[in-house]
């Protein structure tokens, strides 16, 4: 009798432990789902704010070669979320000449990885010249260079800034990965051909479009 009672007690304890384990697992899953539903980036305004603080160019000789020019862009990155951290991997960004309803890349730059704590902001610089992107700059066609020359002689031209990077939003053990392709369109540049210097016109900073997939 004692033997059977002992076995019965062991079975009951094992069953109780299994039930407790299942209930605990369900609670963890439910809490995880609630946290995911509450804090997921797609459930709220885009946490990442991106603005073009400034854009300028020096040593741009539109009469000969565009490769000697140095473009400088300052990007304002901010995390407006009070819970999520933002991690942005090292990425490349392309500067485009905006003309005739088309975009042609004219220069490339590399931006180092960025980490933003909740409710924090940071200013990063992107420099475009012949040494960036391991020296492999976009090929510039002659007809595009000629069109840019004509616009430059008139005192200005339009540019477009394109970015593409992997971003991670994280809170605790929860995280969300996205491939984002922000855009800074319709950038009107004023240019002085004699000095080879140009700058962004109008109000600064410029809002860039950052959308989740």
Image: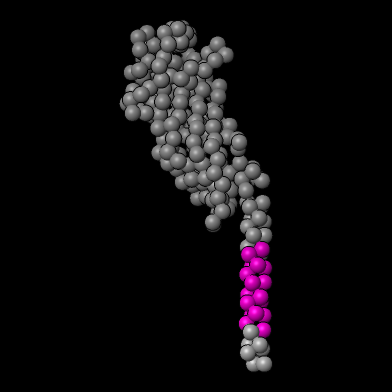
How was the colour assigned to the protein in this rendering?
one colour
Residue at image coords 47%, 34%: 75
Q: Is residue 4 left or right of residue 192?
A: right
Count every numbered label the image shows and give the total.
0
Residue 152 magenta-drawn?
Answer: no
Q: Determine the main secondary structure of the stretch shown in magenta.
A: helix
Residue at image coords 52%, 45%: 168
Q: Quadrant of the C terminus?
A: top right
Residue at image coords 48%, 17%: 104
Q: Is residue 148 left or right of residue 208?
A: left
Residue 11 magenta-drawn?
Answer: yes
The image position of residue 190, as x and y in percent, is 47, 17
Residue at image coords 49%, 15%: 157
Specify start and end residues of the magenta stretch as a single range.
8-26
Q: Could you tell me if residue 119 is visible in this image?
A: no
Vertical relation: 88 (above or below) 33 = above
The image position of residue 163, as x and y in percent, is 49, 31
Q: Quadrant of residue 195?
A: top left
The image position of residue 49, as x and y in percent, is 56, 39
The image position of residue 131, as x and y in percent, is 32, 26
Q: Could you tell me if residue 177 is visible in this image?
A: yes
Q: Quadrant of the N terminus?
A: bottom right
């Amino acid at each position: 009798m004692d033997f059977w009672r002992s076995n019965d007690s062991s079975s009951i304890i094992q069953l109780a432990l299994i039930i407790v384990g299942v209930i605990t697992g369900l609670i963890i899953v439910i809490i995880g789902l609630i946290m995911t539903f509450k804090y997921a980036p797609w459930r709220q305004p885009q946490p990442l704010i991106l603005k073009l603080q400034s854009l300028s160019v020096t040593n741009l000789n539109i009469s000969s070669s565009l490769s000697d020019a140095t473009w400088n862009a300052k990007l304002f990155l901010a995390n407006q979320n009070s819970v999520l951290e933002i991690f942005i991997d090292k990425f490349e960004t392309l500067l485009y000449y905006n003309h005739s309803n088309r975009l042609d890349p004219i220069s490339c730059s590399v931006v180092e990885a960025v980490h933003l704590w909740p409710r924090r902001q940071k200013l990063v610089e992107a420099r475009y010249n012949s040494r960036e992107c391991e020296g492999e700059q976009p090929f510039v066609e002659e007809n595009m260079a000629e069109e840019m020359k004509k616009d430059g002689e008139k005192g200005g031209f339009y540019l477009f800034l394109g970015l593409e990077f992997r971003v991670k939003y994280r809170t605790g053990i929860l995280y969300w990965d996205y491939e984002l392709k922000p855009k800074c369109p319709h950038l009107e540049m004023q240019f002085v051909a004699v000095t080879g210097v140009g700058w962004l016109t109008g109000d600064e900073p410029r809002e860039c479009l950052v959308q989740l997939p």
